[in-house]
Image (cartoon, helix red, strand yellow):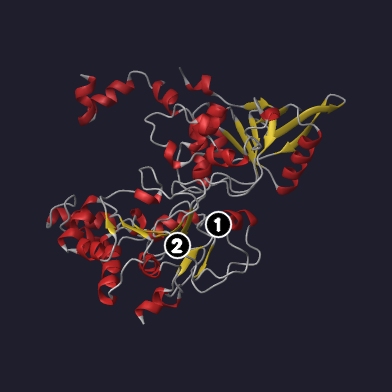
Amino acid sequence: MNSKESIIDHVAGKAFHLPGNDMDTDRIIPARFLKCVTFKGLGVNVFKDDRAKLEGKHPFDLPENQGRSILVVDENFGSGSSREHAVPALMQYGIKAIIGLSFAAIFRGNAVGNGLVCVEVTPKQHEHILIMLADHPLCDVEIDLANMLIELGPFIQEHPDMTPCSMPDSHRKMLTTGEWDSLATALEAGPLIEETAARIPYMAAVVA
Amino acid sequence: MTVCNMSIEGGAQCGYVNPDATTAGYLFGRKYSPEPGEAFAKARDDWFSLASDVDAEFDDYFELKGEEIEPMMTWGINPGESIGVNGKIPENAAKEALEYMEFAAGQEIIGEPINVAFIGSCTNGRITDLRAAADLIKKHGLRVAPGVKALVVPGSEQVRKQAIAERLDEIFVKAGWEFREAGCSMCLAMNPDKLKGNQLCASSSNRNFKGRQGSPTGRTMLMSPASVVACATRGCITDVREILN
C-alpha cells in the first residue's frame, strides 16, 4: 500500500441531483447511528429520516438513481455538526464525488481525508449541469481534477460538454498525489515508523 | 464556549477567545492545571503568548452590547433561523423549515406550547448555567408547568459534583425538574433521552437540525438556560424578563 495507489485524478459515473440548501450532517446521518466503533454499515442509513418520510421518492431511493456515483447538490452541503461519519455514509452508499454550489468547510475537510471528491461550480454552471442532466439523465459524467473540468457526454460530434469547476488547491493536491490517504502516506516512511515509535514514551513498550 | 461553539454555525472555521486573566483565573488550582507557583506561571506565560498581538490587524470589528440583545430563540431547522422572543417569524422564511416546525410565516413564537424543557449540553451545561437556572427558580419560586417534561443534565461529571455540592440539585428536583447524570442527553439523542413524535422542546443545546433530538419529526427551539426555565414554568414560549421583573 502506498499513496500512489490512492491517487484520485478523475471520477467517472452517472449523476443525480439532491435538491435543497444547507443539508446538515444530522440529516446525512442521524445521531443514533453514530455509536459504531468503526464506520462499517453507515451507508444503509444515509439520509435515513428524510428517505423514510418520502417513502421511496427520495433521490437516494429512486430506482433510476441506483448505481449512480456522482451527486449534484445545492448550497452549503454538509453544514452543522462536525461528524466525519457523514462522509463514509455517503461513500458506502456509492457516492464517489459531489458537485455543489458550496460546501461547509468541516465537511469538505472530512471529504478530502476520506478520498471523496467535492467540487464547486458557480450558480450559472450549476444550472447548466442540472439542465443537461434533466435532458440526458443517463449521460456519462467525468470530473477531471487535472484540468478542473466536469465533462458531460459525449453529445455533439463526440465532444463532451465541459464545465469548469473548483476546489481548494491544497485539497486538489492531496487527492491527485494520493496524500489524502494519511495511512498510506505514513506507511511509506518505512523503518522511520519504528524508529520514531521507539522515541515516544507511550509507544516504546508497544514497539519493543 | 457558547460563543466558540456557535461561531461554527455562523460559518466560521474557528471560534476563538484570546486567553487572558479570566482564563488563567479559571485554570488556577484546577485538577489538571500545572501546580500553583512556578509551573503555573510558566504555563500561563505560554498561554498568553497565544493571544493576538496588541497591534494585530483584523478585517472587521463588531461591538455587541449584551444588555441590548433580546432573549433569542430559534424557530427553524438551523441555528441561524432565530428571532427575539417577542419577534415574528420572517415573512420570507424557508418553506421547508416552516413545514417541519409547523409554524407559519409572520407568526409570533411567544405563547407556543412546549412539551419538553432541556437544560444541558457542552455549550450551556456549565456550573454557571446551572447556577443561573437554579437561582431563577429559587428567587421566584418557579415550578415546572403540568405536562412538561423538564431535564437538567450537567455538561460534565465535575459540573455535576459541583452542582450537588452547592445543593442546586435539590432546587431543581423540588421545582419538578429531573436532575440527571452528566452527558450529552437531549443535545443529540444518542441515549434514550429523545423527543417523541412532533414534541416541541425548549432546549439550551446548540443544534436544532431536523431530527436532532431523536425523533424524525421532533421540534427544537434553541435558547438560553434562563429562557428554558421561563418556558418550563409557563409551559409555553416565554420572555424570561417577564419573570425577572
The numbered mark at residue B173 is: none
- Evaluate whether label 1 is on the same chain as label 2: yes
Q: Classify the position of the C terminus of chain A by image quarter.
A: top left
Query: In front here: A133 or A55?
Result: A55
Q: Position of residue B190 (x, y in %)?
A: 38, 42
Question: A146 above or below A19?
Answer: above
Q: Residue at x 52, y 29 (%)?
A: A44
Q: Position of residue B38 (x, y in %)?
A: 13, 55
Residue, disc 2: B114
Question: A97 above or below B81?
Answer: above
Q: Position of residue B160 (x, y in %)?
A: 22, 55
Mark 1 and mark 2: span between their CA atoms?
12 Å
Q: Residues within 10 Å of mark 1 (few under 14, many from 20)?
A: many
Q: Position of residue A63 (x, y in %)?
A: 68, 28
Q: Classify the position of the N terminus of chain A by image quarter.
A: top left
Residue A88 vs residue B28: left or right? Answer: right
To which chain does the residue with label 1 belong?
A: B
Closer to the chain start, of discs 1 and 2, is: 1
To which chain does the residue with label 2 belong?
A: B
Question: B213 above or below A48?
Answer: below
Tell me the kind of residue under disc 1: Met
Residue, disc 1: B101
Please tell me whether mark 1 or mark 2 is closer to you in this view: 2
SS category of the residue bearing label 2: loop
Residue farthest right in this picture: A157
Question: A192 above or below A103?
Answer: above
SS category of the residue bearing label 1: helix
